[in-house]
Amino acid sequence: MKDEYDFSNARRGAVAPGKGKTRITIMLDEAVIEAARALAEKEGYGYQTVINNTLRHALLSGKKESAETGHLKKGITPSDLKSLEKKLLDAVSEIHRMMEPDVRP
């Protein structure tokens, strides 16, 4: 070990940057994270891998939702809540489907 190190040309960040991936901060519903973690633990993957695979599949499958489903309004009504619960259940089903052996990347 050296007594002194030269950090004048050093850069901040990961020592070995991941190829093809970008670190981001994203806000997700607790139910989505819990479902992804549970599935990841069951299947032996990281939960971020589960979320990434689900998003990749959804984007590549060409599914398009109406603009109104992408935004939540202030003061959610009971019918809005029911709709959101259905979407979360659909997301959990999609996560389970993505983790099937024949769907893995």
Image: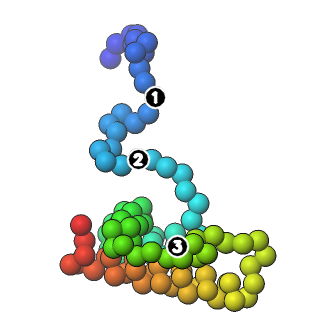
Say what amino acid the circle numbered 2 marks: Thr
Left or right: 41 with respect to 101? Answer: right
Left or right of 20? Residue 37 is right
Distance from Cα at disc 1 to Cα at disc 3: 32 Å
Q: Nearer the viewer, residue 27 or 40?
A: 27
Q: Quadrant of the C terminus?
A: bottom left
Residue 48 coordinates in the image, percent (x, y): 42, 61
Q: Quadrant of the N terminus?
A: top left
Q: Secondary structure at mark 2?
A: loop
Tell me the amino acid under the disc marked 3. Val
The mark closer to the camera, 2 or 3, is: 2
**Residue at image location 61% in from the left, 86% down from the top:** 83
| Residue at image mark 3 | 32
Frontmost residue, 18 versus 90: 90
Q: Which residue is mark 1?
A: 12
Circle nearer the viewer, 1 or 2: 2
First in sequence, mark 1 or 3: give its number.
Answer: 1
The residue depicted at 31 percent of the width and 48 percent of the height is: 20
Regarding residue 40, the answer to whether it shows in the image is no
- Identify whether 5 is placed above or below 11: above
Q: SS at mark 3?
A: helix
The answer to whether 49 appears left or right of 27 in the picture is: left
Percent from the top left, x then y, of residue 2? 34, 13
- Circle 2 residue: 22
Q: Residues within 10 Å of mark 3 (few under 14, many from 20)?
A: some
Earlier-in-chain disc, 2 versus 3: 2
State which quadrant residue 79 falls in.
Answer: bottom right
